[in-house]
Image (tube, helix red, strand yellow):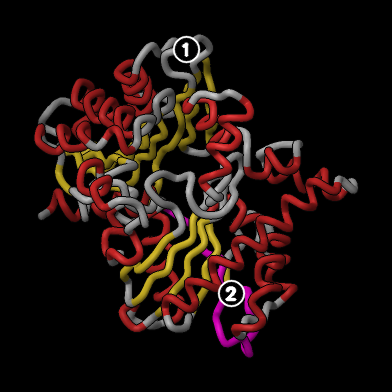
């Protein structure tokens, strides 16, 4: 069975074609700047890497470009569209409606649309991806939606509720939902395999650290708490996002700077975090270069980040009543030994002991155990694979 995995954004479309016989990636790529001048399709397959500028006014045209690449006589990996057995879509916000992945139908699409106010930039784009797939592949090809939020649906009310008037939860669904669920689900399952134990017997803290970041507490395979909230802005500081802060900071700046709600939202999401503190960049590589050159604000940004991550791990250690394993994953989690060391330096008090050499060598695809044999908590680097989770769910649902 070959499954096409889609992650549609408002102006982008990431894709992977996976052969589930061996779970091998046959081709992957990204359509960028859809609907704008200079739109580009990237494609990797058979050891080739292609990038070309081509007009893509909408997602349907983008899918046609993907189809042409997959069928190309030289770089293509299939001979006919009928070889694609099913399509799996990432959908950001499933709210409290979707606690698991499901087959796409008109009712499901309408419910995703109704949840758009909770993810106005993402859910409409995800729907565009589903509808564009239907136009290009036809209605006979089954489609499955996998939600970022569904893995977090096991959180108890004491963890997901906010201390605001209850009516806002009842009227608008204002609560903590969490994100990066497919990533947290994948790496926690892999951690259990590496430890040779049933995940039902483990307490795991997973740290998805990238430009967008979240940490999740998993007890027996079920999420009991996570850092992101109603939106991906909550939690600890990220590339350009603030993370949690005193709500009065928002109203204070709004008043002093005479800003609209949209303007303050832009500041909190796009101009804060590492970028806001360092004044250098939201890209950690640039911030690291600046710190190495003696920039004090770049160092402050990293000090804040490491401290905040450690603080959340500590709080989840308490929430779980102990911890068997801590997992680092995603862009920074997988490729920044300095970050992992900076975080784990705080965790000696709960029994974490890092293997410095193993941590330094765990970069650019090198995975494995980062803690010593004497460490009371196992620390591991596991590369995330959200696309594989989507493909596996799609296969299971279609076969069922």
Residue for point 26% across, 29% down: 127
Front-most of 28 and 346?
A: 346
**Which residue is under mark 2?**
369
Asked if residue 374 lies in the magenta stretch, the reply is yes
**Which residue is under mark 1?**
36
Residue 268 is at least partly visible in this image: yes
Q: Quadrant of residue 199?
A: bottom left
Residue 257 relative to residue 182: left or right: right
Q: Which residues are magenta?
A: 370-385
Q: Nearer the viewer, mark 2 or mark 1?
A: 1
Q: Is residue 392 above or below residue 372?
A: above
Residue for point 19% across, 55% down: 396
Crowding around mark 2 (Cα neighbors within 10 Å: few <14, some 14 to 19, many 20+) is some
Return the x and y of residue 378 as percentages of the image width and height: 55, 80
Return the x and y of residue 377 as percentages of the image width and height: 55, 82
Return the x and y of residue 73 as percentages of the image width and height: 38, 23
Front-most of 182 and 344?
A: 344
Q: CA distance from mark 2 to mark 1?
A: 44 Å
Q: Is residue 16 above or below residue 33?
A: below
Residue 146 is at least partly visible in this image: no
Residue 204 relative to residue 87: left or right: right
Residue for point 44% across, 74% down: 204
Return the x and y of residue 99 as percentages of the image width and height: 21, 55
Q: Are marks 2 and 1 in contact (CB under 8 Å)?
A: no
Q: Which mark is residue 158?
A: none
Residue for point 36% across, 75% down: 219
Q: Quadrant of residue 232?
A: top left
């Amino acid at each position: 069975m070959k499954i096409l995995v889609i992650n549609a954004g408002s102006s982008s479309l990431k894709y992977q074609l996976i052969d589930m016989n061996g779970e091998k990636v046959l081709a992957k790529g990204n359509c960028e700047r859809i609907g704008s001048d200079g739109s580009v399709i990237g494609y990797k397959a058979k050891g080739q890497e292609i990038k070309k500028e081509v007009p893509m006014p909408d997602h349907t045209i983008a899918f046609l470009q993907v189809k042409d690449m997959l069928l190309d006589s030289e770089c293509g990996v299939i001979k006919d569209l009928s070889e694609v057995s099913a399509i799996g879509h990432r959908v950001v916000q499933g709210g409290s409606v979707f606690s698991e992945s499901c087959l796409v139908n008109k009712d499901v699409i309408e419910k995703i649309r109704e949840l758009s106010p909770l993810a106005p930039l993402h859910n409409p784009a995800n729907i565009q991806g589903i509808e564009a797939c239907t136009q290009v592949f036809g209605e006979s090809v089954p489609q499955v939606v996998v939600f970022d939020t569904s893995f977090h649906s096991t959180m108890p009310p004491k963890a997901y509720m906010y201390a605001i008037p209850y009516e806002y939860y009842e009227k608008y669904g204002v609560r903590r939902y969490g994100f990066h669920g497919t990533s947290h689900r994948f790496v926690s399952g892999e951690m259990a395999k590496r430890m040779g134990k049933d995940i039902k017997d483990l307490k795991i803290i997973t740290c998805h650290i990238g430009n967008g970041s979240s940490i999740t507490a998993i007890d027996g395979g079920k999420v009991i708490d996570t850092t992101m909230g109603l939106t991906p802005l909550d939690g600890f500081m990220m590339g350009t996002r603030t993370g949690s802060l005193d709500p009065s900071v928002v109203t204070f700046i709004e008043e002093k700077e005479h800003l609209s709600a949209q303007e303050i939202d832009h500041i909190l999401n796009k101009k804060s975090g590492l970028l806001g503190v360092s004044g250098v960049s939201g890209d950690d590589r640039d911030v690291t270069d600046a710190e190495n050159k003696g920039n004090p604000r770049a160092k402050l940004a990293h000090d804040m980040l490491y401290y905040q991550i450690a603080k959340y791990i500590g709080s989840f250690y308490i929430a779980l009543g102990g911890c068997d394993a801590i997992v680092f994953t995603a862009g920074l989690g997988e490729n920044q030994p300095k970050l992992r060391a900076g975080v784990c330096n705080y965790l000696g008090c709960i029994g974490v002991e890092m293997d410095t050499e193993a941590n330094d060598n765990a970069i650019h695809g090198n995975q494995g155990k980062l803690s010593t044999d004497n460490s009371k908590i196992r620390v591991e680097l596991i590369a995330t694979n959200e696309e594989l989770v989507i493909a596996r769910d799609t296969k299971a649902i279609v076969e069922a």
